[in-house]
Image: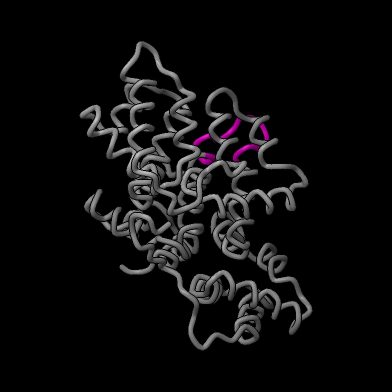
Amino acid sequence: MSWYYTPHPTVAPAEDFDAAADANALRKAMKGFGTDEQAIIDILCARSNAQRQEIAEAFKRELGRDLIDDLKSELGGKFEDVILGLMLRPEAYLCKQLHKAMDGIGTNEKALIEIISPQTNDQIKSIVDCYEEMYDRPLAEHLCSETSGSFRRLLTMIIVGARDPQGTVDPELAVEQAKQLYDAGEGKLGTDEEVFYKILAHASFDQLEVVFEEYKSLSGRTIEQALKAELSGELYDALSAIVECVQMAPHFFAKRLHKAMDGVGTDDATLIRIIVSRSEIDLQNIKDEFEQMYNKTLVSAVRSETSGDYKRALCALIGGA
C-alpha cells in the first residue's frame, strides 16, 4: 500500500538468524516445570513471519515436536492469542479473523470492514484462496450468508476482485466518477447507494484519490462529508473505511486502536488483530499517526490497558518506549 505513504514496519527479519538455535531455545523455555514466557516473547516477537515458519519447521525436524501444540499447552488467555497469531502466515491469520467475525450467532461487521477495506486485489486473492483451503467454503458465500443489502454487495464486489489494479489512473474518468457520486447523493433527493459502492469497490486506490479531489472541486465538500450526509449503518462504515484507507491507512488503524482502548474495558480482539497483522507492514506509521492524533504514544496507551505477558508481547511488537 504505497500509493500515499511509505509503509514502515516495527518487526523486521532478525539478523544472524538461526532457526535451529531458536527452536531449541523455545523448547528449553517450555520444558519442565513452569514456562519462561519472556524467552518466548524475546524470540517470536523479534522475528519476521517467514522466520517463525522456519523455526516451526526446525522445531519439528530437530525435536520431533509441533511448536504450535507446545505453545498451546504452555500458554493461555490473550497472551496465547498474540503468540499463536504470530505463528500463522499473514493471510491465514486474516482468514481466521474473518471466520471468527462470522462464526456463531451475530456477525462482527466492524472486523469484516477493518480486514477487507485496506486490501488490494492481489491481497484479496491470497485471502480468498487461503480461506477456501482452510474452511472448505468460499469466502464470498460465507460473507453472503452473514450480511445483507448494499453492505453485502459492496463486500462481495471487493472479494471477487472487482477493483482495478494498483496504479490504474484515468483523470478524465475521475471527473466523470466524481459527478456520478454527486448526482447519486447530494445532487438528488434520496441516495442511489449502488453508484457509491460500485465506484468505491471498482476503482483503484490511486484512482479514488483523484476522484475524491475532483469531488471536492465539484461540490465544495469532502467525500467524507458527502458519505456522512447520504449514508448510514454498515455501508457508511465500510465506505468511509475505504476512503480513509485511500487517503491514509495508518490514520484508519490508529483510530481503530484508540477506539479499542477508549472508555470502559478494552476491545482486546481488535487490539491484537491490528498489532499482529500490521507489525510487518506499517505499524511504525500507525504509531506515529496515533501519537500525532492523541498526543500520547501507542505503547503507553497499550501499557495502561493491558497487563502481564500479554502486555509485554504487544509492547515488544510495537517497539519503542
- Relative vertical location of residue 98 with respect to residue 149 in this rendering, above or below: below
User: In percent of the image, x 33 and y 46: which residue is there?
Assistant: 247
Q: Quadrant of the N terminus?
A: bottom left
Residue 211 horizontal side relative to residue 293, left or right: right
Q: Is residue 263 visible?
A: no
Q: Is residue 104 magenta?
A: yes
**Location of residue 59 in the rendering, given as x and y in whole percent from the top left corner:** 70, 78
Residue 156 in sight here: yes
Q: Quadrant of residue 17?
A: bottom right
Instruction: Indicate whether 248 appears above or below 44.
Output: above
Task: Please state the horizontal and vertical placement of residue 20, each as a whole percent of the image.
Answer: 65, 85
- Tell me which residue sits at (29%, 59%) in the image: 288
Q: Residue at x 38, y 42 (%)?
A: 208
Say which of 193 and 261 sits in front.
193
Q: Position of residue 139 (x, y in %)?
A: 67, 42
Give the residue displayed 46% in from the left and 73% down from the top.
Answer: 12
Magenta stretch in the rendered image: 101-112
Residue 174 in the magenta stretch? The answer is no
